[in-house]
Amino acid sequence: MLALGLALAYGERRASAAERFSQSAGSDVMERQTQNTRKGWIKHPVWMVALGLLALTLAPMACGNTAEGKGDKSANAAADKGAGGDKQAQQGDDKGDKAKPMAAAKAPADMAKGLLVAISQFQVDENKKVIPKPGPAKLEIITREGGKWNTQVIEDPDSNVFHKAFYYEPPGGEPGIVTLGGMNASVKIWRKKGGKWTAETIWTKDFGGKFNRMRDAEVGDLYGDGKPVMAVATHDQGIVATISPGAEGKFEVKEIDKKENTFVHEIEIGDIDGDKTLEFYSTPSEPNKLDGSVQTGLVMRYVPSKGGEPTVVANLGNRHAKEILVADVDGDGKDELYVAVEAETEKVNKKIRVKSPVEIRRYDAGTDPTKGVVIAKLKDRLCRFLTYGDVDGDGKKEMVAAPFSSGLWLLRPGSDPKGTWGKTLIDKDSSGFEHTSLLADLDGDGKDELYVASDRQGEVRRYDWNGSGFDKTVISTREVPKSVITWNIMPVPAKAVK
Ligand SMILES: [Ca+2]
Ligand SMILES: [Ca+2]
Ligand SMILES: [Ca+2]
Ligand SMILES: [Ca+2]
């Protein structure tokens, strides 16, 4: 009944238990369930219905991260080996090339880098049905050695979701893997000793609202002192903080913004104004709604090394974004901001209808916050991942957009990167609420592979450019698809997790 009700309300199809909860409430409901279970009063299915409806009403959720696109920076502007943007750009907005049949690709037997896969997991009953009860926060560390994919698992019962994990080297300190946990909100660093992973808590906090989550972080020299500083986004009191490594392995947390009842989903670091000072960007929005009603949002800029008030760089009006990317994708030597604006929706006969689909908008230094340039539209409701890299090794960057249900899309700038970009469907049979994606050259051959968590299909996959399309490798398969939501994938040196 709950499933049907939510599916009707959602208006597309029946959703899995995990998705249902993420679509409607995500970690919020996971959190409720956990608390309720702890209290021992969730004993009757009626609570599931009640919670589901509550979730639908409140409809807040945790949201997407940007994977860090990596690539060979040696841009060779002259080398355009076909498959260029112009031709595809001319094909207009919503056509896209047909994806070619996928050949099976083979990853090299050994890879110097592996993957950190940050997950929330749900319990599965004896009939292999996913039940809306979250397990401990989970991290999978996947490496490739001797022709085999190896997976190590870290679970943290202190939280029910890891939104992201990344490799971090504090200056003078011991490197480790930093995790961002939700409910409870904790930033931890994990190190492996004698074959066992143990964690040190860097920052944990009850923000004083309903939801406590560390949601996203990026690392950069934000104070201009050469130290790798984390900029952290949190739910639900709008807190944005920096964490600086200090003396003797200590960390200093500085809260630099705060706004009640605000979810900050995403952080990106870059230098868009070209003054050689790094700034960072965040995406505060109203609490999540998926009932078709308006959810407003902004993109903010902070310059920690200079202080001062944050600036609005994108005002999305009655729309919002959970995903941004700051990078020099067009190769002109300056970073630009890309914002994945979620669809504008309305409720018609209890169904959510898309009024205007997902838009990828571009902002440069000086762009009017209300006038981002639409480089691509995607017929979808949500887009939680933009990642960039050089898929074909020609020295020019491409972008991959991974919206919720319409597949994986390769976007290429045309002759005018401030106009419409070329759009090619990579794989229509890949989808997921987050649809976590990462372009990175983990095998070191000079081309970025695409790593994707296709949660609806229950697979972690790798896609390799083959000259005219992509070949697919399945890295791992979930016993029960949709029993996890994958929030982020990041690269990690294989040596660091041995
Ligand atoms: Ca700057
Ligand atoms: Ca640029
Ligand atoms: Ca390229
Ligand atoms: Ca590669």
Image (cartoon, grey):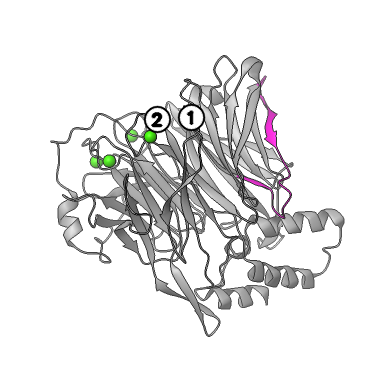
Asked whether 304 falls inside the magenta stretch, the response is no
Q: Which residues are magenta?
A: 193-214
Question: Which residue lies under the disc numbered 2?
Answer: 277
Q: Nearer the viewer, residue 230 or 43?
A: 230
Q: Quadrant of residue 3?
A: bottom right
Could you classify mark 2 by the number of other residues whose Cα lies within 10 Å: few (under 14), some (14-19), or many (20 or more)?
some
Q: Quadrant of residue 210?
A: bottom right
Task: Give the alpha-carbon distance from disc 1 to disc 2, as whole Å.
Answer: 8 Å
Q: Residue furthest right?
A: 40
Q: Is the CB of the residue bearing disc 2 within 8 angstroms of ligand 1?
A: yes
Whether residue 241 sits left or right of residue 30 in the image: it is left
Q: Quadrant of ligand 2?
A: top left
Question: Which residue lies under the disc numbered 1?
Answer: 305
Q: Where residue 110 appears, x then y in whole percent? A: 42, 27
Q: Nearer the viewer, residue 217 or 23?
A: 217
Under circle 2, the secondary element is loop
Whether residue 85 can be seen here: yes
Q: Residue at x 17, y 48 (%)?
A: 84
Q: Where residue 197 appears, x then y in whole percent? A: 67, 28
Query: Which quadrant, please, contains the N terminus?
Result: bottom right
Q: Residue at x 25, y 44 (%)?
A: 466
Asked whether 211 falls inside the magenta stretch, the response is yes
Q: Amino acid at mark 1?
A: Ser
Q: Are marks 1 and 2 in contact (CB under 8 Å)?
A: yes
Q: Residue furthest bottom?
A: 349
Whether residue 208 sits left or right of residue 480 in the image: it is right
Q: Where residue 230 appears, x then y in whole percent? A: 54, 32
Q: Residue at x 74, y 42 (%)?
A: 157
